[in-house]
Image: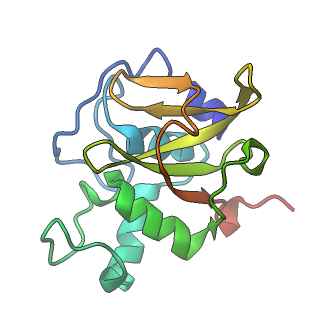
Amino acid sequence: LVQDARGQIGITTGYDPAYRELAFPMGDVDARTGVCTDVVVRAYRRQGIDLQALVNQDMRKAFSAYPKQWGLRAPDRNIDHRRVLNLQVFFTRHGQKLPISQRAGDYRPGDLVTWMLPGSRPHIGIVSQRRSVQGVPLVIHNIGRGTQEEDVLFAFPITGHYRYLPPTAAQP
């Protein structure tokens, strides 16, 4: 997962949060752009896991479990998987929701971390196996300059820590 996220560095060089009509399943915005969630979605797709379809399926089953702030009355397969708050619900429901801590050792490669950025903007990234000189895991994310691997794990208030490996992808 980390390698598939890192493979986006230098390809996804822009940031564009615009709503787009997407193919379904496996729909994506242009690989040269996207948002933080697109880094996660694309990394999982390289693993054969389509979060667009999985989030849509889960929202159709349990729409009331998902945030309502966008005014939707039904799932929207073009955008739901591209919203951090929806991914937090999905990973809580279908993955492991792990404790939030300020200990670098609690975050393993492939873990998903969410933050609240200034201006109350949610953000998500994938924990790398690479570490800063201080020993803090780097994070692969797109915070506005394309996909980057950076020392940002403790730069913003952490709002979630998840591990997601669907049963079909689990190792024996």
- Left or right: 141 in relation to 14: right
Q: Position of residue 43 (x, y in %)?
A: 54, 40
Tell me what residue is drawn at x 47 percent, y 49 percent.
Answer: 157
Image location of residue 108, percent across then percent down: 74, 46
> Looking at the image, can residue 86 be seen?
yes
**Up-down relation of residue 16 to residue 57 (above or below):** above
Which quadrant of the view contains residue 49? Answer: bottom right
Q: Residue at x 60, y 59 (%)?
A: 162
Report the number of discs.
0
- Relative to the observer, which residue lies in front, 23 or 16? 16
Q: Where 56 sits versus 118, above or below?
A: below
Figure quadrant of the C terminus: bottom right
Q: Residue furthest top?
A: 10
Furthest-right residue in this view: 172
Q: Quadrant of the N terminus?
A: top right
Colour option used? rainbow
Taking the spot 37% from the left edge, 81% from the top edge, the residue there is 65
Q: Position of residue 101 (x, y in %)?
A: 66, 55
Image quadrant where residue 161 sits: bottom right
Question: Quick check: 76 left or right of 91?
Answer: left
Q: Residue at x 71, y 32 (%)?
A: 136
Whether residue 46 is visible to the viewer of this picture, yes or no, is no
Residue 76 x, y percent position in the rendering: 22, 64
The answer to whether residue 166 is left or right of residue 124 is: right
